[in-house]
Amino acid sequence: MEKQELTDKLLAFLRRALANKDAQIDPESPLVDQGLNSSGSLELFTMIEDEWDLMLDEDDTDEVKTFNDVVALVEKMLA
């Protein structure tokens, strides 16, 4: 999967987790500052696990603070 395709899919997942399909996402800003709460985080990571048949552990997801961190985590898990 190409990086742009991965990024676009992850953006769609994040917007769904935020319950705002038109949300403007700043890739460097903390996700909590963009409205992502704990239930939204759970939904986001569940969508990622389901899409790519991954098993993310709490240590990995605890390190995710920004959208760029989400992309980097998924790229690492898919490598």
Image (cartoon, grey):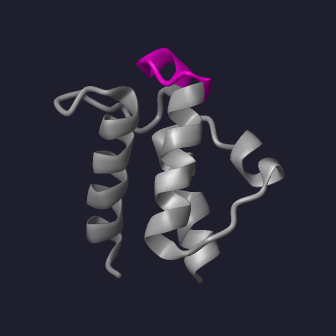
Q: From the viewer's perspective, is residue 7 above or below residue 45? A: below
Identify which residue, 12 or 66, lies in the foreground.
12
Residue at figure coordinates x 30%, y 59% from the top left:
9
Task: Confirm whether residue 38 shows in the render.
Answer: yes
In the image, is 2 to the left or to the right of 69? left
Q: Quadrant of the C terminus?
A: bottom right
Residue at figure coordinates x 59%, y 39% from the top left:
42
The total number of labels drawn is 0
The boundaries of the magenta stretch are: 32-38
Q: Is residue 2 magenta?
A: no
Q: Residue furthest left?
A: 22
Residue at figure coordinates x 42%, y 20% from the top left:
34
In the image, is 50 to the left or to the right of 17? right
Residue 21 in picture, x, y percent from top left:
20, 33
Residue 14 in picture, x, y percent from top left:
38, 41
Q: From the viewer's perspective, is residue 16 above or below residue 59? A: above
Identify which residue, 50 or 6, lies in the foreground.
50
Identify which residue, 38 or 9, lies in the foreground.
38
Q: Quadrant of residue 62?
A: top right
Residue 57 in picture, x, y percent from top left:
78, 57
Task: Confirm whether residue 30 shows in the render.
Answer: no
